[in-house]
Each structure stands twice: as structure tokens, then as C-alpha cells.
Amino acid sequence: MVIDLDMRALLAAALFGSGIAAPAAAQDRIEVVIQDAGQRDRDRSVLVDLRLLNDGPAPAASPLAERIEARLVARGADRRVWLERDGSVVSTDRIPPGGFARARYRLRLPDDTPIDGALLSIPALSGQQVVMSERAYVGAATAPTGLASTAGDDRAAQPQAAPVPADRSVGNAFLGNFGAYEPVYAVYGPGTNSEARLQVSFKYRLFGAAEAGAPERRQEGLYFAYTQRMFWDLRADSSPFRNIDFQPELFYVTPARTMAGGVTVSAQAGVAHESNGRGGAASRSLNSIYVAPMAAFPLGGGYRMSLAPRLALIVGDLSDNPDIRRYRGNTGLFVEIGKDDGLRLSTTTRFNFATGKGAFNADLSYPLPRILRGMPSIYLFGQSFVGYGENLLDYDRRMTRVRIGVALVR
């Protein structure tokens, strides 16, 4: 965007909070550009770097506001956000002719807000929209270098802080490929022989992590994932884990496509192994090949709905549980409705149409800091299960469970 002399006073009053010194010549111009957006800092805030370019023949001042209103469009949801000035990168108050000044702002969002591929704009400054590219914290964050001044830059070089000695993310690109997969939680419901249920899960992108270009390709790739579900009998002597299910997975995610109305579609296909790591009569295991088309629909007000039907083919040796198809079936449906920073309901259904058997699992979550200020960024998490096979050991037992607890990832 180009800001002419006539617009500077208005822009200063609205955004900068102070007057902008008028240059000597009326043809002076300042162009504001979003240079970079998406790197996470140590505190998980998103860094946004601006460049102010002076196209005119005379020096120009560039005071900036402490807070600037911006617009973030992510997964079809359009929201107003605020950028807060970061004092660690100092902008000059006088931009030389043909030169530039630099300013850094911070965008503070919940950790689970999807920003990779989101669109960021600052309507009051420019019609420019930039595609955000989320990058993990890698020590002291640095502003992008590009756009060298053509008339010299009178800023002193900013010293960069040394990384924390215990920060293993520094120099380890391997860590940047890790991500959340299934929810990570601990829930409890008394009155059963598996009162507590815990789950840990992660995924690692094997290929496609360095994919550049259009945002719809950024989630594409081949992944390895691992999920572990633990069922804890707290009332028994020595409080043993009644059953532990292990599920490694290898899957591919296609590039997402955005359709009319902001609807996003993609697909996932993979192979999964499930077992409980036990021997004898308690041994359970199965292998499956599956495909799951996925779609996300914006509902307005920041809400969206995601759908993912699944078709699975159970393959390989089933001697540990020869009739498991009867209870599990080959079809499933995942449905999720909610807000990124609010209430979210996720349901998973399995069904065998031939036998009429299956299962229904529902997770309800809400950010705990929105209930109690100062709480860590975790979620109040409720879970219910009705049907067959909450765990592999009990694949042929019908049960009903209700539990409540907390989740790190939902």
C-alpha cells in the first residue's frame, strides 16, 4: 500500500497515536509491507515483521502504535486480532530517502489456533494479504533480512541473544517435523475396572516437511504416527494398568483444496497396527488399511464443522481375536464441531451394518484459562463411550463409560 501525504495525519491519529512529521516535499511516500509472519517465539506468540519504505526524496518519520488491529482468516473463520509492538526490534524515527525502517509486532493466540496457511492482513495500513507459514521456536528469533536499503540504514545492529543451553530445538530440524495427532489427555470416572484412561499421541512427517509454495500443500506428506491408550484400574491392589493398546501408523495426507464458501477438502489413507502387547489368552492384535476423506465447513461466528468418514479393511492374522470384525466393523465416522478458542465436541463412531454392533465415543473440551484466569493452556476434558471394544482386550464386551479430566491436546 502507498500512503500519500494527505493520508498521513489520519493514519497517525487512527493507528500511530502521534503525529507523523511532514516531509519537505509533497510527493514523499511511505509504503508499509508485511515482510514476514508465522515464526513462534519462546512464549509461543507469533512474530509479525513490518517494513516501512520511503519512496520519496526527503527523510520521513515513522512512529508506530503499540497495538494495531489486524484480520486473521484461518480455516474459513474470519476474526479480528491485535498486534502488539515488540520493543526488542527498534524502528528508526527517521527513514532516509529510498530507505526503510523495520518494526516487529506479536500476535498472541491460543497454542492450538491453526495459523499455517492462514491469511493475515492489516486493513488500515494495506490491502496486502500474506499467507502465514508457522515455524517452531529455534532459539532467539530473528527478523528476516531481505529488502536492503538503497540509501543506507542508520540503525545499529541488534545483538542476538544466545539460545538457552537446554533448548534441544536449536539446530535440530528433526524436532520441527513433530506434531499433534490424536488428543492427549487423562480422564477419570469411578465405578469401573478401568477408572482412568490416559492417551498420548504424536505424528512425524517423513516426507513433505520442506514443501514450499501454496498453503494447501503445507500439510501434504507421508507421516508416521503413534498413539498409546492406557486403562488404569486404580481400585485394584497395586493399581495396575488393566490394558494398554499400542497403535503405530503410517499414512499419507493429500493437499487440501478450498472450495466455494470456504469449505476445505482433503483425504488421508494409511495402514495401522493395533495390539496390547500381551501373551496367551489376553493377547489382542489386528492390522488394517484405511482411507478417510475429510472436509471442514465454516459455520460462522468462529465455529466450524469437520467430517471424516472412514472405510477400513482388516487384514492379516486374527488368531488372537478371530471374530473382531463382528464387533468393530469396517466403517467409521468422525464429526467435530467447535471453535478454535472455545467449546469443541468431537465424536467417533464405528459400526458393523451386518451385525448391528459398534461403538460411539464423544469428547467435549473447553480451554481452562477461559474459566480460571492464570491457568495453564490446557483443556477441561469430558469423555463418554458406549458400545463394544473401548480397548482391544474388551473388543467383544459392551460397556458404558463416562469420565472427566484434562487434556494437553484436544
Image (cartoon, helix red, strand yellow):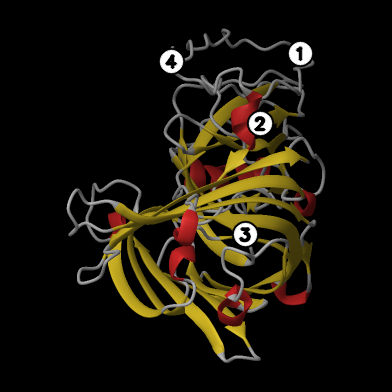
Q: CA distance from mark 3 to mark 1?
A: 36 Å
Tell which tag, 3 or 1, sits nearer the viewer: 3
Q: Residue at x 37, y 79 (%)?
A: 399
Callout 1 secondary element:
loop
- 1 or 4: tag closer to the N-terminus: 1
Between the residue at mark 4 and the residue at mark 3, the CA separation in whole angstroms equals: 34 Å
Which of the two discs, 2 and 4, labels the residue nearer the N terminus? 2
Residue marked by disc 3: 73
Whether pointer 2 and pointer 1 mark residues with C-beta atoms closer than 8 Å, the reply is: no
* Mark seen at residue 151: 1
* 10 Å crowding of disc 1: few (<14), some (14-19), many (20+): few
State the SS at label 4: loop
Say whether residue 81 is left or right of residue 102: left
In the rendering, at what x and y percent does residue 372 appear? 22, 56
Q: State the residue position of label 4.
A: 164
Residue closer to the observer: 51 or 92: 51
Question: In the picture provided, is 166 more to the left or to the right than 89?
Answer: left
Q: Residue at x 20, y 68 (%)?
A: 190
Residue 58 drawn at (x, y percent): 71, 22
Residue 48, relative to residue 115: is it above or below? above
